[in-house]
């Protein structure tokens, strides 16, 4: 539904631009700019900086269902990469967000990946565990 709305908005902006250029109605520039700014705001994917933006990113890219599953199954913590040197101190099903990496501990396996590669791996872990359940 949301993508259909965005496509309609892009189409409307295109029609307004064509109308403005053909008929030289420059007042149409105001709704074109406002609609474009709104579209930019709605389609922007947030950068992952902390746990809040982590969930916003997952909701925007993968959907609410996977974000909800991550909230249920994993403990998301803001931390640093030095925690990876002591994986036994981390509880199972923990994800630690650091500045430019993610540490994922599932069972006895600890993985350190770049931020967005780690999120993709976390989603794969959830999808694979759902297939085996």
Image (tube, rainbow, N blue to C red):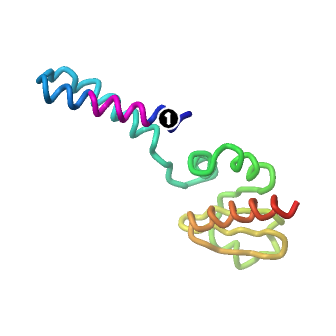
Q: Position of residue 57 (x, y in %)?
A: 57, 50
How many numbered marks have been drawn onto this rendered protein structure? 1
SS label for mark 1:
helix
Mark 1 surroundings: few (<14), some (14-19) or many (≥20) residues within 10 A: few
- Taking the view exactly as shown, the residue that stands out farthest to the right is 133
Q: Is residue 27 left or right of residue 126?
A: left
Q: Position of residue 68 (x, y in %)?
A: 73, 46
The quarter of the picture where residue 106 lies is bottom right
Name the foreground residue: 34 vs 103.
34
Q: Is residue 17 left or right of residue 6?
A: left
Name the foreground residue: 57 vs 91.
57
- Considering only vertical position in the picture, is 19 above or below 112? above
Q: What's the magenta bit mostly, secondary-structure-wise?
A: helix
Residue at the image position 39 percent from the left and 32 percent from the top: 38
Residue at the image position 45 percent from the left and 42 percent from the top: 43
Image quadrant occupied by the N terminus: top right
Q: Any magenta on residue 8?
A: yes
Q: Any magenta on residue 57?
A: no
The quarter of the picture where residue 13 lies is top left
- Taking the view exactly as shown, the residue that stands out farthest to the left is 24
Q: Position of residue 22 (x, y in %)?
A: 13, 27
Name the foreground residue: 22 vs 47.
22
Magenta-tinted stretch: 7-15
Q: Position of residue 133 (x, y in %)?
A: 88, 60
Q: Which residue is mark 1?
A: 4
Residue at the image position 57 percent from the left and 50 percent from the top: 61
Residue at the image position 27 percent from the left and 29 percent from the top: 15
- Taking the view exactly as shown, the residue that stands out farthest to the bottom is 85
Q: Is residue 41 left or right of residue 116?
A: left
């Amino acid at each position: 539904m949301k993508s259909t709305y965005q496509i309609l908005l892009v189409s409307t902006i295109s029609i307004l631009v064509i109308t403005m250029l053909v008929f030289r109605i420059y007042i149409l520039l105001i709704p074109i700019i406002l609609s474009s700014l709104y579209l930019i705001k709605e389609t922007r994917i947030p950068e992952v900086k902390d746990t809040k933006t982590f969930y916003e990113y997952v909701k925007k890219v993968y959907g609410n269902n996977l974000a909800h599953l991550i909230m249920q199954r994993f403990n998301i913590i803001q931390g640093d990469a030095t925690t990876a040197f002591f994986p036994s101190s981390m509880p199972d099903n923990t994800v630690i967000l650091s500045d430019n990496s993610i540490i994922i501990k599932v069972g006895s396996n600890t993985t350190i990946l770049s931020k967005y590669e780690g999120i993709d791996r976390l989603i794969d872990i959830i999808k694979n565990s759902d297939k085996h359940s």
